Image: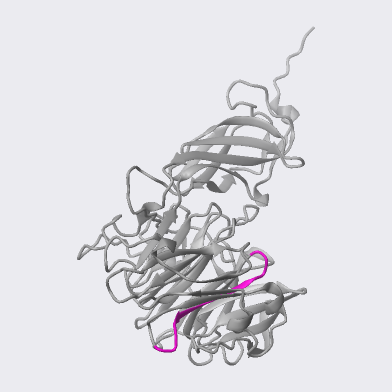
């Protein structure tokens, strides 16, 4: 499952077919930070956090790091974007007793009630303005191969939790490849429109060569603060990168082996103590390569053998149980249908050359004639599996985001219909040419990119929600006693 990083402006959307009232994405707090990791008892501490979309209320608890028991409770703000609250060190953030010395963490619960539906939240153009001849664009993604994949770390114990990262390439001269990093409300940390931030996170793929493209990204299964990036490269440059979340992205290691010059997507899984990279290589190829010391080692093995010779595979992903999902944009006769397969964790672990096929797949989901470009997979923490479907005959009849099923379903063989589509375009050309990255966040909201329109969007369900988040491990607070010099002393005779 794929995941994020620090600072930048992503933009979210949620759609429903009949919009009757304001509906928002499931809101929750992230990027919880404190102004100091050590404070004197009864002194002020500033707590900051981001909310992806306006919530109803926010409750802040101070909990013991040892047993999570609550020692202080007070109200926080619940506005979209960055929130700041000052805690005075007491049990009620008012005139109550001071919290005892010890180690503590911040826990923030955001509550909200919305209409039960998917609806639009935001975009990097004017919301709902995609049909305009000149929509208001923030240019978060540049022309070319923009918004290729999204990564969202969903481990609240990590510093990277709450960021949204997008790989993108400008197919220009000179070419630029980078990671666009956003806050969860799709704002840019530096307040820019996205261009400057992109250049702060350059990737060392080839530049100045036609069709050198950054494609897929995924989280490392051992550490959600690290990601893997795959690309299409030319010459001597490496095609797979490995890097760590930081205030300034840096490549920790670069790995590349022969035969990986056209990777469309990457997923990394751990099997029997060994990590493997799985790379969707385009035409009916799914390469498996061992990883040692965060370097690709050995020769890739193509483990896929589908009789239909499905063309232009785009996405590969794993669910929490280790089942593998693979998508194809079209079948052997052209852009007239797409497919999604799932193989069990046991089948994948034992896979050798040309061993995964239709007959041993648990899921075999087909799209009807007229639907093509099955671009990506998003898997929520609750197990719902979604796919983006683009590039149909031009009338928008099948484009959109579809619910495929839940990971708990072991056998899923069907042809999708309009009843499976949860998000539909506003107009015929919306979600039009390429829909690339699609990913789910901690609360089940869906993020989606459409590179033909340079769009980044968030979609979210409605309902009544209460999402508690505890600050990452790095934000543990130590409350200490005031030094003697801080006390007022008087001499009595």
**In x, y percent, where is residue 193?**
35, 60
Judge left or right: residue 71 versus residue 312: right
**In x, y percent, where is residue 332?**
44, 89
**In x, y percent, where is residue 268?**
63, 74
Judge left or right: residue 82 versus residue 354: left
Residue 105 versus residue 127 in the image, above or below: above
Q: Which residues are magenta?
A: 320-333
Residue at (42% x, 57% y) in the render: 458
Residue 52 versus residue 410 in the image, above or below: above
Residue 201 versus residue 369 in the image, above or below: above
Using the rendered view, name the quadrant where residue 270 is placed. Answer: bottom right
Residue 400 versus residue 459 in the image, above or below: below
The quarter in which the N terminus is drawn is bottom right
Q: Would you say residue 472 sits in the magenta stretch?
A: no
Camera-nearest residue between 92 and 323: 323
Q: Residue furthest top?
A: 493
Camera-nearest residue between 416 and 35: 416
Q: Residue furthest right?
A: 493
**In x, y percent, where is residue 390?**
38, 72
Using the rendered view, name the quadrant where residue 154 is placed. Answer: bottom right
The quarter in which the C terminus is drawn is top right
Residue at (57% x, 92% y) in the render: 259
């Amino acid at each position: 499952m794929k995941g994020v990083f620090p600072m930048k402006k992503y933009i979210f959307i949620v759609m429903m077919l009949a919009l009757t009232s304001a509906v928002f994405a499931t809101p929750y707090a992230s990027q919880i930070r404190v102004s100091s990791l050590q404070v004197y008892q009864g002194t002020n501490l500033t707590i900051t956090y981001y909310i992806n979309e306006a919530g109803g209320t926010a409750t802040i608890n101070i909990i013991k790091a040892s047993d999570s028991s609550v020692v202080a409770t007070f109200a926080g703000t619940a506005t979209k974007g960055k929130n700041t609250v000052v805690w005075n060190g007491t049990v009620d953030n008012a005139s109550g007793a001071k919290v005892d010395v010890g180690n503590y963490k911040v826990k923030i619960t955001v509550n909200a009630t919305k209409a039960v539906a998917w609806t639009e939240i935001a975009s990097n153009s004017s919301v709902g303005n995609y049909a305009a001849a000149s929509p208001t664009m923030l240019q978060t993604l540049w022309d070319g191969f923009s918004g290729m994949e999204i990564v969202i770390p969903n481990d609240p114990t990590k510093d990277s939790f709450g960021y949204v990262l997008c790989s993108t390439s400008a197919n220009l001269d000179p070419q630029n490849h980078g990671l666009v990093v956003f806050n969860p409300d799709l704002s840019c940390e530096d307040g820019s429109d996205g261009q400057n931030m992109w250049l702060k996170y350059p990737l060392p793929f080839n530049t100045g060569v036609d069709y050198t493209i950054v494609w897929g990204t995924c989280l490392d299964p051992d550490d959600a603060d690290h990601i893997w990036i795959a690309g299409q490269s030319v010459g001597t440059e490496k095609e797979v990168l490995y890097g760590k979340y930081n205030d300034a992205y840096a490549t920790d290691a670069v790995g590349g082996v022969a035969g990986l010059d056209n990777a469309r997507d990457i997923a990394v899984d751990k099997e029997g103590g060994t990590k493997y990279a799985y790379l969707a290589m385009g035409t009916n190829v799914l390469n498996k390569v061992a990883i040692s010391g965060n370097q690709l080692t050995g020769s890739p093995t193509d483990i896929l053998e589908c009789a239909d010779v499905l063309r232009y595979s785009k996405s590969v992903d794993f669910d929490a149980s280790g089942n593998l999902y693979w998508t194809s944009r079209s079948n052997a006769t052209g852009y007239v249908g797409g497919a999604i397969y799932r193989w069990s964790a046991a089948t994948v672990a034992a896979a050798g050359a040309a061993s995964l096929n239709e007959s041993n797949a648990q899921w075999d989901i087909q799209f009807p004639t007229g639907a093509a470009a099955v671009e990506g997979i998003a898997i929520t923490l609750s197990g719902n599996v979604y796919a983006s479907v683009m590039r149909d005959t031009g009338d928008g009849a099948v484009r959109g985001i579809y619910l495929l099923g839940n990971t708990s379903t072991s056998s899923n063989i069907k042809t999708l219909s309009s009843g499976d589509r949860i998000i539909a375009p506003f107009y015929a050309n919306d979600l039009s040419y390429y829909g690339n990255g699609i990913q789910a966040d901690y609360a089940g909201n869906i993020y989606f990119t459409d590179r033909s329109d340079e769009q980044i969007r968030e979609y979210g369900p409605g309902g009544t929600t209460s999402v508690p988040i505890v600050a990452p491990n790095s934000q543990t607070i130590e409350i200490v006693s005031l030094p003697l010099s801080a006390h007022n002393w008087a001499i009595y005779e």
